[in-house]
């Protein structure tokens, strides 16, 4: 199972200056390679290397291996761009936005991350502690040796035991610290075997997770559902007592973005960039907390996790205009990713089920009708009169009910 570990470099002013100049030179070279790729319509790594390596090598005095990394970075960027275009994330073919994206080469920020392989960056871990060590890294000013790094002891232990592949050099700007350098390394941790058992053959062996706008995540486990709704949902306390409803905070952030966008000044644009990073950190923090709590409960009770299959949700769901921004402004895919990797690390089975009609189906009699859900929170069956304690919990129950069938299909051996 691939994950990433981040450590901070304790670089002095001279070392940090060398790292900044190295990233600037690498990204300037990457921009040159990107222009060549766009002009000649050549994007595959091997073909792009053949037409751009000589210029990339001499452009900013990069080493041979670093120049190769710049070319691979450009090829990967165009692969991601083509995937996004194919998925329609820049609009339909012929739209103004799509034409603008296709007409210009991919550009890299001056301090965009740069990958380094083991020939350009080597690690030396402390023998007396798990919280740090030193690295030797290539720069345009020569190789920096004995550059200290520090990190969380658990993360550094994983790094020592399971590091694989390239490591990214990242420089970020911190409000009180200025520029700070980090290394983001890939680790390949062996996955524990996924738990099995007879309890997975019935809904009671699964925790259903219903995702929504008012409540980010609600589970079929009642105590856990109450905890998540009280911490992140509409009833979450605000002010000094807590962070308030996630939905309310998202609404305030969106309204502030609209005001700043309307101003369209240089300072407003700068503040928008800062707030975008802050909102992304907030979303990731909440998603980490929710996924960690759900996986911990599933591991403790020996159950599996059933989540909604969200692929193509924006294309399937029809929304009124006021609902669109709210529906699209939370990283539900990120929450699904966090649940998946945390569950895999804990050996907890996880399945994605079809969410169709899970919020409309009565768990008592099976009657399905959109009129059963009389409001966001209330569910009253029009056939048998069953009233759920909360409509989102009922949706989570229906997701848990579908999990055994989906799990059985996923574990059937292939005929091949």
Image (spheres, rainbow, N blue to C red):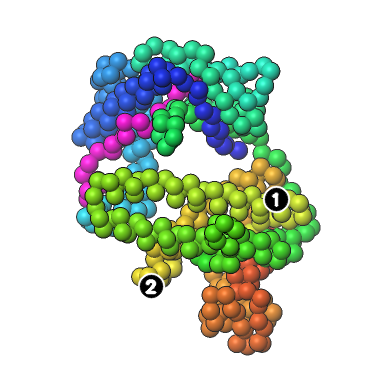
Query: Which residue bears the numbered disc 2?
Result: 320
Query: Which residue bears the numbered disc 1?
Result: 296
Residue at the (54%, 59%) spot, across then down: 239
Q: Inspect the magenta stretch and tell me whether residue 119 lies in it.
A: yes
Residue 54, given in percent of the width and then of the height, sits at 27, 18
Estimate how packed mark 2 is, as few (under 14), some (14 to 19) or many (20 or more) residues with alpha carbons within 10 Å: few
Q: CA distance from mark 1 to mark 2?
A: 37 Å
Above or below residue 401? Residue 48 is above
Q: Nearer the viewer, residue 202 or 21?
A: 21
Q: Which residues are magenta?
A: 99-121
Q: Is residue 29 visible?
A: yes
Relative horizontal placement of residue 229, taking residue 248 as reference (left or right)? right
Relative horizontal placement of residue 54, taking residue 280 as reference (left or right)? left
Secondary structure of the residue carrying tag 2 is loop
Residue at the (54%, 48%) spot, across then down: 285
Above or below residue 227? Residue 360 is below
Q: Is residue 311 visible?
A: no
- Residue 259: image quadrant is bottom left
Relative horizontal placement of residue 197, taking residue 75 as reference (left or right)? right
Above or below residue 34? Residue 139 is above
Q: Main secondary structure of the magenta part?
A: loop
Q: Nearer the viewer, residue 400 or 147?
A: 147
Q: Which mark is residue 55?
A: none
- Mark toward the start of the polypeptide (1 vs 2): 1
């Amino acid at each position: 199972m691939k994950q990433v570990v981040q450590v901070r470099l304790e670089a002095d002013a001279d070392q940090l200056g060398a790292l900044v100049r190295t990233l600037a030179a690498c990204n300037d070279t990457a921009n040159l390679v990107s222009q060549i790729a766009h002009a000649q319509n050549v994007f595959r790594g091997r073909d792009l290397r053949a037409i751009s390596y000589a210029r990339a090598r001499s452009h900013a005095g990069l080493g041979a291996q670093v120049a190769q990394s710049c070319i691979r970075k450009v090829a990967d960027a165009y692969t991601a761009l083509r995937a996004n275009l194919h998925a329609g994330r820049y609009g339909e073919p012929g739209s103004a936005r799509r034409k603008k994206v296709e007409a210009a080469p991919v550009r890299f920020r001056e301090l965009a991350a740069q990958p380094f392989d083991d020939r350009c960056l080597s690690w030396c871990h402390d023998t007396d502690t798990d919280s740090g060590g030193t690295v030797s890294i290539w720069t345009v000013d020569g190789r920096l040796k004995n550059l200290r790094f520090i990190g969380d002891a658990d993360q550094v232990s994983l790094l020592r035991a399971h590091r694989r592949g390239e490591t990214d050099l990242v420089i970020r700007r911190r409000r009180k610290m200025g520029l700070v350098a980090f290394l983001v390394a890939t680790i390949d941790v062996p996955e524990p075997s996924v738990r099995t058992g007879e309890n997975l053959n019935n809904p009671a062996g699964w925790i259903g997770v219903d995702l929504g706008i008012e409540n980010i995540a609600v589970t079929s486990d009642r105590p856990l559902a109450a905890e998540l709704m009280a911490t992140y949902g509409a009833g979450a306390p605000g002010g000094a007592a807590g962070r308030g409803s996630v939905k309310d905070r998202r609404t305030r952030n969106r309204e502030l973005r609209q005001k700043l966008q309307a101003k369209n000044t240089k300072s407003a644009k700068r503040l928008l960039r800062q707030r975008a990073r802050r909102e992304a950190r907030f979303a990731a923090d909440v998603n980490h907390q929710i996924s960690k709590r759900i996986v911990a409960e599933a591991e403790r009770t020996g159950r599996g996790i059933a989540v909604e299959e969200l692929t193509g949700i924006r294309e399937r769901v029809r929304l009124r205009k006021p609902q669109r921004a709210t529906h699209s402004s939370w990283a539900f895919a990120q929450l699904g990713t966090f649940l998946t990797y945390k569950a895999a690390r804990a050996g907890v089975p996880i399945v994605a089920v079809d969410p169709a009609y899970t919020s409309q189906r009565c768990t008592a009699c099976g009657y399905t009708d959109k009129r059963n859900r009389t409001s966001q929170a209330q569910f009253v069956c029009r056939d048998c009169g069953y009233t759920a304690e909360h409509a989102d919990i009922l949706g989570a129950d229906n997701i848990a009910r579908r999990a055994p069938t989906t799990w059985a299909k996923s574990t059937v051996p292939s005929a091949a």
